[in-house]
Structure formats: C-alpha cells, structure tokens
Amino acid sequence: MSSLILHRISRQVIECGKRSYRLEPTIAKFSFSQTGTHTTQVQARTEVTSANREVIFSEGNGKSVTDSELTFEWSQLQTAYQSKRNEEILRAMFVLKICSYDTFVRNSMQLMSLGRWVLGRTLFEFLLRNTMYSQFVAGETLPAIQNTIRELRQCGIGTMLCVPNEEDLSTDYDNFRDREAMFDRNANAIFDCIGKTAVLNLNTLFWSQLLEEGGFSQMKVTAICSPMLLNVLNKHLAPYEASTEALEGLDIPSFARGFDGKLNVPVLNDNQNEHLFNVMKRLDKFAEACINRNVRLVIDAEQTYLQAAINQLVLVLQYKYNRNNPWVYNTYQCYRKDTYDRVMANLELMQRLGFHFGAKIVRGAYMTMERNRAADMGYDDPIHNSYEDTCRMYDQVVDTLLHLASRTPAEVMIASHNEESVKLVVQRMKELGIAQDAGKISFGQLYGMCDQVSFLLGQKGFNVYKSVPYGPVGEALAYLGRRATENRDVIKRTEKERSLLWQELRRRITSLAH
C-alpha cells in the first residue's frame, strides 16, 4: 500500500475526544427476599469521576478502591486487533467513518433505496455485502454464522443471535387474523434462532462450558405481535408502569392465565384477545425452548408507545419461568426519565409474586423518534435532556442491580459501548464480590462495533457477548438501516475505535518496512 493511500486514510481518522462528566452521589435502597422470610436491606452510595480516568466507589464503611486494572489503552488492546485480517481492518475503518456522518446515517434508508434503483439489485447487494453487511451481520448460512461465532469465541467473546424481524405502527393494521401467518413465520425464525444458539454453542464449547455458560437469544415482540394491539394495551398500562398496582384484569396473575387458554383482557375486544392469546402462545413456546436448551431469552425494549405493553408480556413470562432462575430477560432503556422508578416498581412486584430479575440494561435507541412523536402529539418528552443525564441514570440503575445480583439469583447484562460505564461495573463487581465468570453479570455490544471493549473484557475472562444479527442481505440491511438511524449517536462516537484500527494497520506496515 502506498504512503499516499495511508496518508489519505490517516486523515479520515479522528482522535477520540475525552468526555468528562461527574455522576452526583445517589442513594439506592431496596429490600428483597432471598430465602423464605429472610429480607436483606441494601444501601449503596456511588460516586464517579472520569476526568482523570479513575473510578472511585464508597460504601457505608467508607472503604474506597481505585480502578487501575481495566485500561482501554493500546498496550492492552493491541492483541484485540491482531486476529483481524488487513481487509477487515480497512473495511471497519471505512464503514465506521462513513457511519460517523450524520447526514449519511439519518438518510440511510433512502440512500439504500436509491442505490438499489441506480445500481440494480445484484450490484447493489454485492457492494453492500462486502461493506456494511459484512461489518454488522454474521452471514446468511449456518457455516458463515459458525465461522463468526468461532472467531469471536477464540477471543473470549460469546454471541447473542437475533433475527432482524420487527414491525411498527406505520406498517400495521387491525385485521389481526390476516397477519397471523406472517407472525407465525417470524415466530418460526425466532424458534430456529434459539435452536441455532444452542447448536452453535455446542459446536464451539466443551460440554462442561456449555452446561455452565449456555447462551443468549435475542428478539423483539413486534416480530410476533401487532404494534396496534400493543399500542391499545399500552394506553391502559402506561399510567401504572412505575407502580405495583394495576387495573382489574390487567395484573400479572390475570394475564398469566392466558398460558392456560383462559385469557380475557377486559379492555380488549374478542378479535384483540384472540390475537393476544396467539402472541402469548408464541412467547411461551420460545421460553420453554430456551430452558430446554440452556439458553437465556432476551426480549428487547421498543418505543414508549408500545413499551408498557411489551414490559407486561415480559413480566408475565418471567412470572411463569423465572421462579428458580432468570431464564427470561427484560430490557430497560435508561434514556427514559422514568426508568429508575420503573425498575424499582418491577423489583417490588417480583418480590411480592416470587420470581427472579433478569434484564439487559441499555441507554436506548429511539431518541429522535420519541422526541419527534412527543412534539407532534403534544405530550412531555420522555427522554432525558442530555447524554450526561442518561449516563447518570444508567449508572444509578446498574449500581442498584449489581447489589441485587450480589445477593440473589438475579442476572444482569450490561449492554454498553461506554468505556467508563464498563470500568465502573468491573470495579463494582470486585467491590461486591461478584465473580467475573460466574454468569451473574454479562456485558454486551453490537457486532461490528466497540471491539476495543468486547475484546478486552474477553481477554480478562468476563462474560461478554456480541449482539449478532443474521439473515438474507435484503432483510438484514433494512434492519441495519433502522438500527443505524436509531443508534447514530452511538455510531458517531467511534473515533477511538477507528484510531485503534489505524494504529494496528500502521504497526503492520511499519513491521513490513523493517
């Protein structure tokens, strides 16, 4: 490669700016029953400062610890990129740079449609298969997915497979019976994904590791349920999201009767109740299959105008299956202003009804959509005013749940691309005595992004997973276009990753010159 090409590439790499913020001290206090009538009180005080790249924790005894073990510097991260081929490094630098342009990401769906029209389907899919698709998608066939999983496993990283299927109100209509066949096809794809998760784990792990570690399978409720039905339910459930109370007939035990064919939600008509019953049968099938295959089922969060209904369905599923272990994971979005209150209400509900907490904690992916809808419909914006406010909420929720996981069977996935949040969790686990490989706490990042975090956690022996979509190019790219639009704030923060990729490429060129 000529020095001119390298010079042009280097000019495209932007050095990562150092973000500095301070988390105000917060108090998290709750109680939970661990065995019988025994109740434990937990109280913690967390203080974070990232200005000097240190994380300091203090508890009731005043003990403090400074984190110096998990450092996201080149000296520790170099081996993370040594396994990548030259073309993979160049592709990652190119794709992540293109995705850092807000105009490109904001108009990604329109640009893909234009590209398909101008270039034709064959040439368009060829170009995207070798750029965006290969960067963010595992592949179409089982051998391709196996190769991806094997490469990640060699670096200590697990996979959380997901099928790129979902719906929104804009594509929905209320003739549910005509759409059941489509939802059944999506359900079969998710069921197949659960099977692939188990089989691929079996092929990449020894039996002892498989039985101990299992795997994760990820899904969205709108792949198997009409968003219109969820929206109707949401209007009745949303006022009670941060409460343990519910309208008559909308409580968790009443909903759970739907698993036995006795579903009659009073706020729904017969057509809606029939569709909801079919949805619950699908979810029941997924959860049972996951338990039989030692796989955790992770159900994603979606838009606020659907999320109260989705949360209700997840809680009902947890009520049935999380009695002994947290097989079903919910997802909590910390860019919402009410997330901490909702988490605390759900913890109280779980204590009362006797099932265990399992969840993925994210910052959130629908910010622009949520704000535009709030402005158009004239209600208060449900999203935090700033990224820093979201980070404070994220760390507050995570710290509360780490305390819970240290004393109960609860499990938490820290789904974050933020290095400071990851460092905070690692140090807090140490303080609370949570073993890094016990399966209680896991970390998650998107496939094709944030490798400097994933690879380092894998090297250190933590449970870390990549969210890995797979499927045909057409379906996967539509999914990625939506994800790019929703996650553009995250994608724009890839300067450091691109800088590290450039350092590895420069190291290889320098070694060849000598």
Image: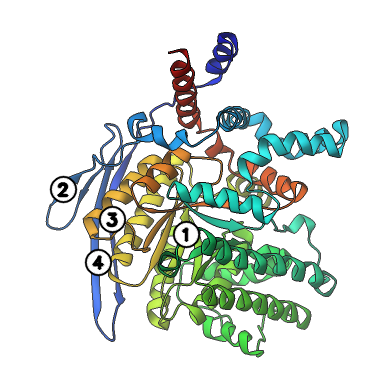
Measure how far apart labels 4 and 2 are at the Cα level: 18 Å
Quadrant hosting residue 193: bottom right
Q: Are marks 2 and 3 in contact (CB under 8 Å)?
A: no
| Nearest to N terminus: mark 2 or mark 3 | 2
| Figure check: 451 above or below 362 | above
| Nearest to N terminus: mark 1 or mark 2 | 2
Question: Which element carries disc 1, helix, strand or loop?
Answer: strand
| Figure check: 5 above or below 384 | above
Q: Amino acid at mark 4?
A: Val
Q: Which residue is mark 4?
A: 42
Q: Which mark is residue 118?
A: none
Q: Position of residue 435 (x, y in %)?
A: 28, 60
Quadrant placement of the C terminus: top left
Measure how far apart labels 1 and 3 are at the Cα level: 16 Å
Quadrant placement of the N terminus: top right
Q: Which residue is mark 3?
A: 429
Q: Is residue 163 rendered to the left or right of residue 380?
A: right
Residue 445 visible at all:
no
Q: Which mark is residue 360?
A: 1
Q: Which residue is mark 2?
A: 64
Q: Is residue 34 rendered to the left or right of residue 91?
A: left
| Figure check: 387 above or below 288 | above
Q: Residues within 10 Å of mark 3 (few under 14, many from 20)?
A: many
Q: Is residue 115 rendered to the left or right of residue 328?
A: right
Residues 215 and 482: in front is 215
What is the total number of numbered labels drawn onto the structure image? 4
Measure how far apart labels 1 and 2 are at the Cα level: 28 Å
Q: Residue at x 53, y 85 (%)?
A: 253
Question: Which element carries disc 3, helix, strand or loop?
Answer: helix
Residues 212 and 250: in front is 212
